[in-house]
Image (cartoon, grey):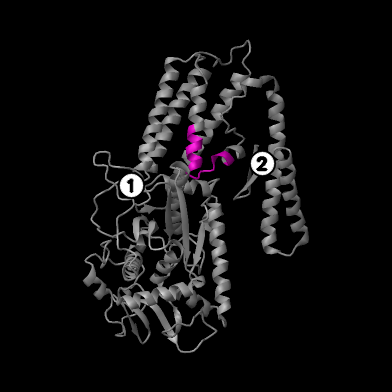
Amino acid sequence: MWHKLSSRVRYFCSPFRGLSIDSTTKSVDLKIDSSLTWYSCGPTVYDVAHLGHARTYVCSDIIRRILSDHQGISVKFAMGMTDIDDKIITKGKDRGFGHRDEYSKMTRYYEDLFWTDMSHLNVQRPNAILRVTEHIPEILQFIQNILDSGYAYIADDGVYFDVSKWETHTDNYDCFGMRGIPQDDEPQHQIGGDNVVYNGKKKNPMDFALWKVTGTTNDISLPIWHSPWGYGRPGWHIECSAMTFAYFGAHVDIHSGGIDLQFPHHTNEIAQCESHNLHLGLNISGKKWVSRWIHTGHLHIQGRKMSKSLKNFISIQQFLSSDITDSPADDFRLFCLQYRYRTALTYSSERIEEAAGFRKKIVNFCGYVDTLLTADASNKENDVVNTSCKPSLESSRLEGLLGTVQQQVELELRNDFNTPTVLLLFSELVGQTVQYMNLLLKEKQQHPLEPVLAVREYVLRLLDMLGCRFAALLRVNGVNSSSSSGSSNRNNEEEQKKASAVVGLLVEQRAIVRSLALKMLKANPENKELKDLLSTCDQTRRDLNSLGIELEDLPGGISNWKVK
């Protein structure tokens, strides 16, 4: 269930505020039994993605994981892929493209790079990828439905949405309150948001293109399609509206994107979909097209929004290949977790290093737990450490702190996904647990081990739920992430450690070989020796699996393993 909050925006544009319920009034905006639908605007694939994109999609992935993996909601998630656009056409012309198929090859190339970047950042793939060029028939029908509704008109150069006429139906066209606010990278004469300069062919400057006509002939050098209004291509805003209708129907629970998309893109999407659904009688119950909006804040660099058009961006590939930290992909996710997803955020190397500091604190804590486990396992007559004892006052305090933190974390995750406070709670809990462990190892006091293991299991489980790959990070650092002390069979512990070390070494060496082979294969895709090498790596995985060892290859040349 969803908490009903007051907002300056009305009717269509309620912002998303996380999972909760007003316990006093029992009033909710959106009831969800066990599933929801979510559409995310995706990239325009004409170039490599940058860290501004990364922040949007990592934050969306974090929220998606909280809803699905923590709250147990089945999320049907789709992402749009803009593979036809003015910028795409401009780039193709600059490259001298002579056939429309060349545009398709270029956009698919950049889309593949985007998904590779997302994989490195541990962003889950959507349930469906909705590409504009694969939905032209649905887009044409959607435009026709809006024409039939009377809220669009045909001009010499295309089909336009009539904003003025729509505003006679609703007083809430500018539902995000963004009209008139200059955008960093949008000229004022393009106020309709469709890159069509006001030239008198559309009725007023606020009208925006649904279909852009290029002519009456099928020019195979351009990515254009036949339509009842002439050869051309879709306008920007109509793409998402038609694709979501084709995939989800007349209603979407959550729609997300960067905050710069509020106006004009999302504003115009709402106008299109509401007029379309009104004409077809699909919103008789008054149900909004979108129930909740998630808008991620800008990522700034050097005082301005990170943007390709402003030429002040760091590509994801550049960032991941840098030596800013020893684990940049994981530290970028922690960087995102340390700030509210809706706020504007300034990127700096110092802030990434701060995120790395949190990561190292967790890794060091788990290493300290390993030290305690080793001391406990080797304890005989020399009394290195003694944890085989009844609960103490100190252990009860730590257990109580863990319970309190668990309750607070639940509240904060439901408070508009307040991950910064969650990380602070984890940091405090780990700090208090280290003090408890000092009593055992340094002051030789007798306290039970179980609260320490419970803290480690909880913190790692929640961080894993948020998409932080601490299990793999700990294995790389030679630290155990299991919550088991191994005390049930200490006589075999040394043999188990040796066997684990052998398996770990094998997995590590295989990961190195596999990573190098994959990189070299990109430059030499037909190299038989490299393909044979990868086949050997796959066979090693199968051999380990037959021995009861499950192996998982992770981005960045890391492989994780566990006993099935």
Image quarter (top left, top right, bottom left or bottom right) of the N terminus: top left
In the image, taking residue 119 as reference, residue 515 lies left or right, namely right
Residue 112 is inside the magenta segment = no
Of the pair 539 and 5, the residue shown nearer to us: 5
- What residue did someone put label 1 on? 2
Residue 438 picture location, percent across and down: 49, 21
In the image, taking residue 312 as reference, residue 292 lies left or right, namely left
- Specify few, some or many for label 1: CA neighbours under 10 Å numbering under 14, 14-19, or 20 or more: some
- Range of magenta residues: 458-472
CA separation, marks 2 and 1? 39 Å
- What residue did someone put label 2 on? 550
Q: Please name the amino acid that badge 2 sits on.
A: Glu
In the image, taking residue 5 as reference, residue 42 lies left or right, namely right
Helix, strand or loop at mark 2: strand
In the image, residue 420 sits, relative to residue 317, either above or below, namely: above
Q: Please name the amino acid that badge 1 sits on.
A: Trp
In the image, residue 395 sits, relative to residue 115, either above or below, namely: above
